[in-house]
Image: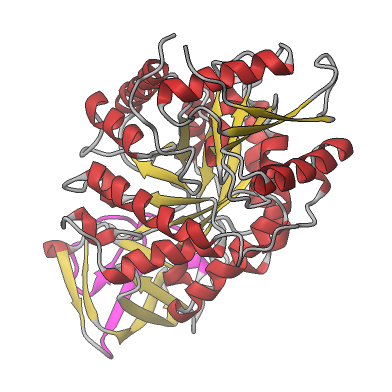
Amino acid sequence: MAHDATPIEPPLVKTKIIATVGPACADAAALRELVLAGVDVFRLNFAHGTHDWLDQVLQSIREIEQELDRPIGVLGDLAGPKIRLGEIAGGQLLCQEGATVVFVRGQINDASQELTCTYAPLIDDVEPGDRILLADGTVELVVTAEEDQRVICRVVRPGTVRSRQGVNLPGVTLSTPSVTDKDREDLAWALDHQIDFVGLSFVRNSADIRQLRELITAHPGDHAPHIVAKIEKGEAIADLEAIIDITDAVMVARGDLGVEVDLATVPILQKRIIRMANAHRVPVITATQMLDSMTNSEFPTRAEASDVANATLDGTDAVMLSGETAIGQNPTAAVAMMSRIVSEAEQTVGADVPRRFEPDARARALEVTEAVTVGAVAIAEQLEASLLVIPTLSGRTALAVSKERSPVPVLALSDSTTAARRMNLYWGVRSIGSIQTDTSPRRLLDAVCNWGRQLGVLETGQRLVLVGSSNWSTAGHDLVMVHSVPPGD
């Protein structure tokens, strides 16, 4: 398969970029532009779009993957038990401070000062003193009483609410399961289409992750996508380490998190989540409103640029764009700007991020491989190598090297398409699946040199460091080789 001749940034830009697909970028030409601008993983938001529409989008992504000879990850984001207001008489309601607002069962209501919602058990789950937040937390109610299948509330933060806006119940234990009936349908679609990652919304504790994993295991077939636990509830913060112990990746979902907990604590929680994920070698995504102004503007604000840079310095593996690409006026510009910002921030990564971690056993590579990769990173840095090359079947070795946060870009080679796509979430790792790994180290290095010259990312005389094996028929890595790129033909 011929390689695309366009020089590609990702071997140099180490923090991965996730872009949400929506009406603004759903056609094949727009998706291709986003990949060339720096997108590593596309997010499909199951809260929007039919399965027929998702079929078309996924087919376009896979065709682009083949055309560019480049793995592209896909994250299917389950909607979870998102609570929304029902229809409001007149479409909106002005909630004045001190006024009484009543929640009643159902989703359609004609009475003024009464609200309904999509979550029927709200009437049963809340108690006097509980807070109910509406419209992304801009309007706050406090429950004062329950009577005759109604919940009486007092407005403590005034504002206008509209039909179908979000409802948050911070601190309230919900009786609904974390995986809804709609989620089960979307999960079945994701598994049938071999989606690489599945995001679980509104995770409350590690049991929610176990439930999702059981559903995946019970589905016909053997495809098991990696689970991304979205941290957006206070309960998840309380059970954070247990969640990270069992999930495959985490997302700092700052939108709902900023409503569920004190907004002032979100930056500190972001750093805590990233730090803990790094320590356990679990990839971590930072999301929500990163370049929000670029949904309607040509440039981000200075605060947004600082936010993206700080997430990179915190140690996030990936940053995610939502409305910026899904409905934004220029999705490609948003991705290109994100790439520029993280590239600048990465120049200082290494000095501030811890270089050695004590990972859990689940994330460890083989003992010899661990030792060899640590040595290979040191050699690559001392020789100022242009690439650290790692053949890997599962991607575990690449993840081990990723968490070293080395300034040397990593090129991971895998015969597994699934592993190659999943490695698109690993910081500093560029994965490819077109170079055969079951060959001699010398031939493998020659193939990498040819690949790099074709893409314009390697030049004659540059050095490569290969983490390989003296016996390709056995698992593990016990060999380090240094190679100089020879002159081209």
Whole-percent x, y for residue 200 in the image: 53, 47
Determine whether, in the image, residue 209 is placed left or right of residue 56.
right
**Looking at the picture, does residue 105 appear above or below residue 150?**
above
Q: Residue furthest right?
A: 367
Whole-percent x, y for residue 55 in the image: 35, 22
Q: Is residue 255 visible?
A: no
Residue 77 figure quarter: top left
Whole-percent x, y for residue 198 in the image: 53, 38
Q: Residue, x 48% and y 79% (percent of image)?
A: 130
Frontmost residue, 138 versus 60: 60
Frontmost residue, 263 versus 136: 263
Q: Residue, x 71% and y 12% (percent of image)?
A: 438
Can residue 134 be found in the magenta stretch?
no
Q: Residue furthest top?
A: 1
Frontmost residue, 53 versus 143: 53
Tally of numbered discs:
0
The magenta span reads 98-125
Q: Residue, x 58% and y 24% (percent of image)?
A: 418
Whole-percent x, y for residue 478 in the image: 85, 30
Quadrant of the drawing holding the N terminus: top left
Residue 2 figure quarter: top left
Residue 49 figure quarter: top left
**Looking at the picture, does residue 198 appear above or below residue 477?**
below
Determine whether, in the image, residue 55 is placed left or right of residue 449.
left
| Predominant SS along the magenta part | loop
Q: Is residue 344 visible?
A: yes
The image's colour scheme reads secondary structure
